[in-house]
Image (cartoon, rainbow, N blue to C red):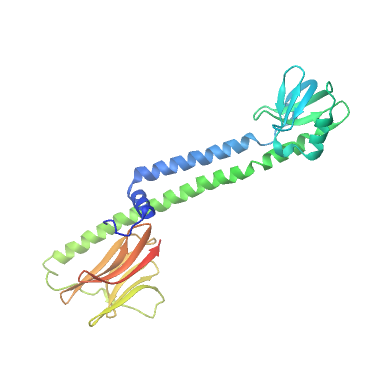
Amino acid sequence: MQRREDEDVFDTALRVIRESLILQLAIFLITTALGSFLIYQTRKYAPIKRESAQTYTGSFETYRSEDHTVAFSDGAEYRLYPDTVTNDLEAALTALETGTELRLLVNPKIELVIEIRTGTAVLLDFDGSQTAIYAGHKDSFWIGVMFIGLSLILLILLQIDRIGRKKEKTRQRVRDGKAKSPKFRGKGTPPLRDADMTKRGRILLEATEDKYEIVYRRLKKVNELIVNGRVYAEMKAVFEVAHTLSAEIDGHKIEAGLEDGGYSFSYIRFDGETLAEKRRVI
């Protein structure tokens, strides 16, 4: 299909993706890698057991509220996760006397303080702090799952589309071959059957030209070109792909089909002239 004059950037990008298996696989690998990275990052923030934590005991020097850091007299500094710093904890650390002995538990995977104890009180709770840390990152886990899931679904749909396009090209070759055979040459296209209009289908387009009433419809998983109540061409596909249904009747070429693009167009043409057209999202 040639590019339409009104094809926008999105249309062009989608068309290029649909036509390139290498590009499809590249997008799948990139989005899967991104999703896996987000999941891995989230798992880093998952709660750990107490015995897995690093322990530090030191003499308190100061607390810097601007970066949530506890500093000690020996030069050691440990950072707290912002969501674990409640007003009460910040007030307690700010009021803490220099030289007070503190015992910290630190998550070694993320190097964040998950417990603070003085000799008589628990300033930062081990379980509560880890719950707050994980809650601040667990959305990334589901975003990562969504990236992987959607990329897999997209890849499957694109492969179904690719197979459908291949089948449609084969159908077109068979149709053109029959039209050129001695049996049908110059005799026009024979109808396949009478159209059963009592069956509920989706009318994609309708048009009338002279004595020809043209209907382009989808009946379950079959697209049909109907002229004056008879089906002259059809395409069977679970998912629609770009296609052209055509028939030669009384020396006139009648076509109906779906053109490519991010936003695709259904059309009916009579001797090359467009009688009806509708933009569709597929």
From this view, report whether residue 55 is shown above or below residue 154.
Answer: above
Q: Taking 64 as reference, is 21 left or right?
A: left
Q: Nearer the viewer, residue 278 or 150?
A: 278
From this view, report whether residue 178 is shown above or below residue 130.
Answer: below
Q: Nearer the viewer, residue 20 or 172?
A: 20
Residue 254 location (% of width, % of height): 23, 72
Residue 217 location (% of width, % of height): 35, 72
Q: Is residue 146 visible?
A: yes
- Residue positioned 23% across, 83% down in the render: 211
From this view, report whether residue 80 is shown above or below residue 98.
Answer: below
How many discs mark residues in the rendered view?
Answer: 0
Residue 43 location (% of width, % of height): 62, 36
Residue 199 location (% of width, % of height): 39, 77
- Residue positioned 24% across, 61% down in the render: 172
Seen from this angle, which residue lies furthest right? 120
From this view, report whether residue 152 is shown above or below residue 105.
Answer: below
Q: Taking 52 as reference, is 214 left or right?
A: left
The quadrant where residue 52 appears: top right
Q: Taking 191 as reference, is 137 left or right?
A: right
- Residue positioned 81% across, 31% down in the render: 94
Seen from this angle, which residue lies furthest top? 74
Q: Is residue 52 visible?
A: no
Quadrant where the N terminus lies? bottom left
